[in-house]
Image (spheres, rainbow, N blue to C red):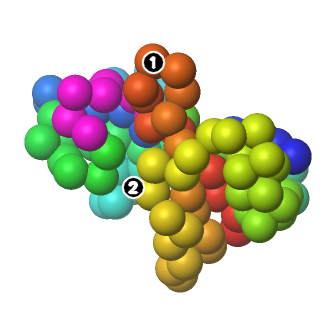
Amino acid sequence: MIKGFGGIFWRTKNLDEIKKWYNEVLKLDIEDWNGTIIKSDPQNETIFSLFTEEDPYFPTEQQVMLNFQVHDLEETIGHLNQIGVPLAKDKEVGEFGQFVWIKDPEGRLIELWEK
């Protein structure tokens, strides 16, 4: 079901300083959209993206959000329904693919993505 990590997103208090650190120390080219794409294989890519403390994309009290890339989002949603895991956000379709959110047992949002 899971293809790999689709992304790792986390909040930072000093976006410019952290971007510079990741660029200098790990040679990650953090682009103007505050992220970079790491391609380990042609069928999968991992997005590493930084968010400000105030960015509303995911709850501000959650410092990190994992994004898992899935092979088939509809099949994944069916599996979640079958085992009683509700969607925290209905399916969203956009230019980057299809997304849903679920919550882990401690209430952290997890994003599931089909490219």
Is 57 part of what is drawn in magenta? no
**Circle 2 sits on which residue?**
31
- The amino acid sitting under disc 1 is Glu
Residue 69 can be seen in this image: no
Q: Residue 37: image x %, image y %?
A: 59, 52
**CB contact under 8 Å: marks 2 and 1:** no
Of residues 39 and 66, the one drawn nearer to the viewer in this rendering: 66
Q: Is residue 20 left or right of residue 92?
A: left
In the rendered structure, find residue 106 and report the number of the disc placed on it: 1
- Distance between the Cα atoms at labels 2 and 1? 32 Å
Secondary structure at badge 1 equals: loop
Q: Picture quarter containing residue 78? A: bottom right
- In which quadrant will I find the C terminus? bottom right
Q: What residue range appears in magenta?
A: 59-65
Q: Identity of the amino acid at label 2? A: Glu
Please tell me whether mark 2 or mark 1 is closer to you in this view.
1
Foreground residue among 35 and 99: 99
Find residue 20 and report its image quarter: top left
**Circle 2 Cα neighbour tier, 10 Å, few/some/many (<14 / 14–19 / ≥20):** few
For the point 34% across and 59% down, the residue is 33
Please provide percent x and percent y for residue 48.
51, 41
